[in-house]
Amino acid sequence: MKKSIALVALAFGVTGAFAQDLTSKKGEPFLPEAGDWAVAIDANPFFTYAQSIFGKTNGTAAPSWNFFTNAQTITGKYFVDPQTAYRGSVRIGFGSNTVRNQVADRSVAAGSQTVFPNPVAQKENSWKNSGTTIGLAVGIEKRKGKTRLQGYYGADAGIYISTVKDKFTYGNALAASTTPSLNVGVTAADDFGPGANNYDAAPTGIQGVLGSARATEIKQGTIFSFGVRGFIGAEYFILPKMSIGGEFGWGLGLTSTGKSKTTYESVGNASSPTVGTTVIEGSKQSGFTLDTDGKNSVWGPTGSLRFNLYF
């Protein structure tokens, strides 16, 4: 504990020799000026790393260049004058991942190609998961203070949108027949596992299924969030145009989640088997909060220490 206190004191007092001069010995200004830009990163890894050095402990990795949110939101400021800055945050992400499984070719009679040297006939199932994440925030910041210890306050507004989709493709097409040996339906071989959630022995909302059903597409409900907040914080300039600080916020958040849609295919109707598809919809959800803010995908974790760079 004493070592942690000493490290914080070092960070805030490393330039104490300059007292409250607002310029360095080289004439460099400590505080931001009109036309300056700024970025912020999480300062906690640096304190942890420094503590391991001064505390002579091993195994602590060197700090990496992380933005101050867990979701890697890019943030910045632009100063129109020394006391006023416009703030902005952005997170835009697109991603996809494909998993492939080799399964037995069910059009070939069982055991007909399992004798060496004949290879086992196989087909490919694939699962593609994709998603989009967009987070945007804008705000204004006002500053107060005539020393290297600067207080600030202001307001932000932001939106967050997220979508997720799973698409499944199967090598073995479903077939329906009153002759059991020719009736090729859904089997456990179509299942990609719990993470895919594509195989259901008794899918809710599907009537008359012979056996099980398998999903061909799952669309999660689109998540949309909107928030406005006021914030207050402080920072201390340890070097010219470099500071350590943090902020807290309070505001309103609104969130809605649209209906999910799952498309199943299966064999149904015992008297006259047919292959068909069914779309099952989920329920909408919504909520709101009016409270001090915490972690989110636009503003980041409040109350954490931040290392700010101005240029």
Image (cartoon, grey):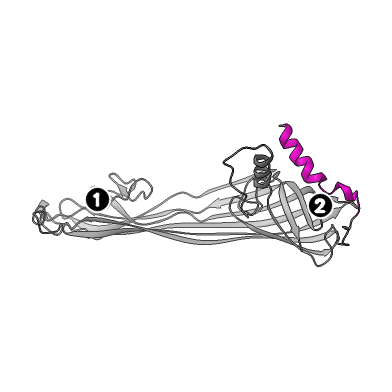
Per the image, label 1 sits on a secondary structure element best described as helix
| First of labels 2, 1 by sequence position | 1
From the viewer's perspective, tell me whether residue 151 is left or right of residue 134: right
- Viewer-nearest residue: 42 or 161: 42
Is the C terminus in the top left, top right, bottom left or bottom right quadrant? bottom right
From the viewer's perspective, tell me whether residue 133 is left or right of residue 21: left
Is the N terminus in the top left, top right, bottom left or bottom right quadrant? top right
Residue under circle 2? 237
Whether residues under marks 2 and 1 lie with C-beta atoms below 8 angstroms apart, the answer is no
Residue drawn where x is 43% and y is 50% of the image: 282
From the viewer's perspective, tell me whether residue 293 is left or right of residue 6: left
Pointer 2 local density, CA inside 10 Å: few below 14, some 14–19, many at least 20: many
Pointer 1 local density, CA inside 10 Å: few below 14, some 14–19, many at least 20: few
- Viewer-nearest residue: 35 or 198: 35
Across and down, in percent, residue 64 comes to 61, 52
Q: Where, by quadrant of the figure, is residue 53 drawn?
A: top right
Residue under circle 1? 189
Residue drawn where x is 17% and y is 50% of the image: 270
Residue drawn where x is 82% and y is 56% of the image: 142
Across and down, in percent, residue 262 comes to 38, 54
Per the image, label 2 sits on a secondary structure element best described as strand
Residue drawn where x is 66% and y is 52% of the image: 299
Residues shaded magenta: 2-21
Q: Is residue 172 visible?
A: no
Q: Name the outermost residue toward the top.
A: 1
Kindly report the distance in space between the C-alpha atoms of the residues bearing marks 2 and 1. 62 Å
Across and down, in percent, residue 239 comes to 81, 54
Q: The disc labelled 1 sits on which kind of residue?
A: Ala
Q: The disc labelled 2 sits on which kind of residue?
A: Phe
Residue 121 counted in the magenta span: no
